[in-house]
Amino acid sequence: MEWYLKVLKQYADFNGRARRTEFWMFFLFNVIVSIIFTIIDTMLGTYGALSGIYGLAILIPALAVSVRRLHDTGKSGWMILVGLIPVIGFIWLLVLYIMEGTPGENQYGANPKEVA
């Protein structure tokens, strides 16, 4: 939960680097919260209103942590646009998100693993 809150505190911070743990814990808690909101929407019959509001609220932090994760692998944040390529783009981004970050400092800042 602390990783999820850390990403929310850095709401629109696209600078720096994000470790794999930070990215994937945010992703996990985001999926859990989305499922909870979907269940509540279904029970209340609100046709996805709560889920939609949550999705819009979490869009910027999700993009920011994705860009910081790409920075950790030494790639530009613009590489996120590769995801627009059907199938291959998704697979390539997944590989980048799973990769170990570059050791030491890179052009995007110090290694968050060494700073922590």
Image (cartoon, rainbow, N blue to C red):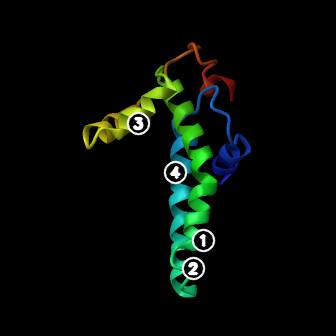
Kind of residue at badge 1? Leu
Q: Nearer the viewer, mark 4 or mark 1?
A: 1
Q: With respect to residue 100, does 102 lie above or below?
A: above
- On the image, numbered disc 2 is attached to which residue? 40
- On the image, numbered disc 1 is attached to which residue? 50
Question: SS class of the residue under badge 1?
Answer: helix
Alpha carbons under labels 3 and 1: distance apart: 30 Å
Q: Nearer the viewer, mark 4 or mark 2?
A: 2
- On the image, numbered disc 4 is attached to which residue? 27
Name the quadrant of the C terminus.
Answer: top right
Label 1 crowd bin: few (<14), some (14–19), many (20+), radius 10 Å: some
Is residue 61 something one can see in this rendering?
yes
The quarter of the displayed image where residue 83 is located: top left
Residue 98 — which label?
3
Question: SS class of the residue under badge 4?
Answer: helix
Q: Position of residue 48 (x, y in %)?
A: 52, 73
Kind of residue at badge 2? Ile
Question: SS class of the residue under badge 2?
Answer: helix
Q: Position of residue 27 (x, y in %)?
A: 51, 51
Q: Residue at x 64, y 18 (%)?
A: 110
Question: SS class of the residue under badge 3?
Answer: helix
Q: Position of residue 108 (x, y in %)?
A: 59, 18
Tell which circle, 4 or 3, labels the residue nearer the N-terminal end. Answer: 4
